[in-house]
Amino acid sequence: MVKCFEKAMAYNPTPIERIVLDFEGKKFYANLHLNGSKKKSPGVILGPGMDMFKEDWYRAVERYVLPLGL
């Protein structure tokens, strides 16, 4: 899944970076979606579970991935 997402990152219209955060002594792996602006912007931390993935992720795929022909 990570390899597939890394390939999809290259087609995203704005930059996405893979990051690792320290959280209570453990590693938290995340994807940082940047808006492409040099201005300071608010950040949102989204921690979806499997329920959110199956219910909502398809909308993002339809909107951003499928139009690219992936």
Image: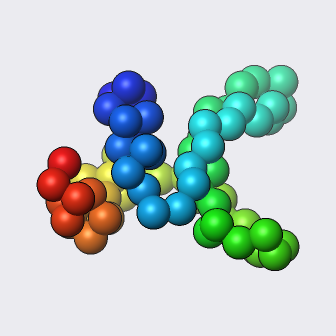
Residue 13 position within the rendered picture, expressed as x and y whole percent measured from the top left: 45, 63
Front one among 25 and 62? 62
Instruction: Give the quadrant of residue 15.
Output: bottom right
**Residue 49 visible in rendering:** no
Total numbered labels: 0
Which residue sits at x=44%, y=45%? 9
The answer to whether residue 46 is above or below residue 3 is below
Front one among 69 and 55? 69
Colour scheme in the image?
A: rainbow
25 sits left or right of 27 in the view: right
**Residue 44 visible in rendering:** yes
Which residue sits at x=36%, y=44%? 8
The answer to whether residue 67 is above or below residue 49 is below
Front one among 10 and 21? 10
Instruction: Give the quadrant of residue 46.
Output: bottom right
17 sits left or right of 41 in the view: left
Residue 34 position within the rendered picture, expressed as x and y whole percent measured from the top left: 63, 61
Instruction: Give the quadrant of residue 24.
Output: top right
Which residue sits at x=27%, y=70%? 63
Residue 51 position within the rendered picture, expressed as x and y whole percent measured from the top left: 32, 53
The answer to whether residue 51 is above or below residue 30 is below
Residue 70 position within the rendered picture, expressed as x and y whole percent measured from the top left: 19, 48
67 sits left or right of 14 in the view: left
Which residue sits at x=38%, y=26%? 3
Q: Quadrant of the N terminus?
A: top left
The answer to whether residue 35 is above or below residue 8 is below
41 sits left or right of 68 in the view: right
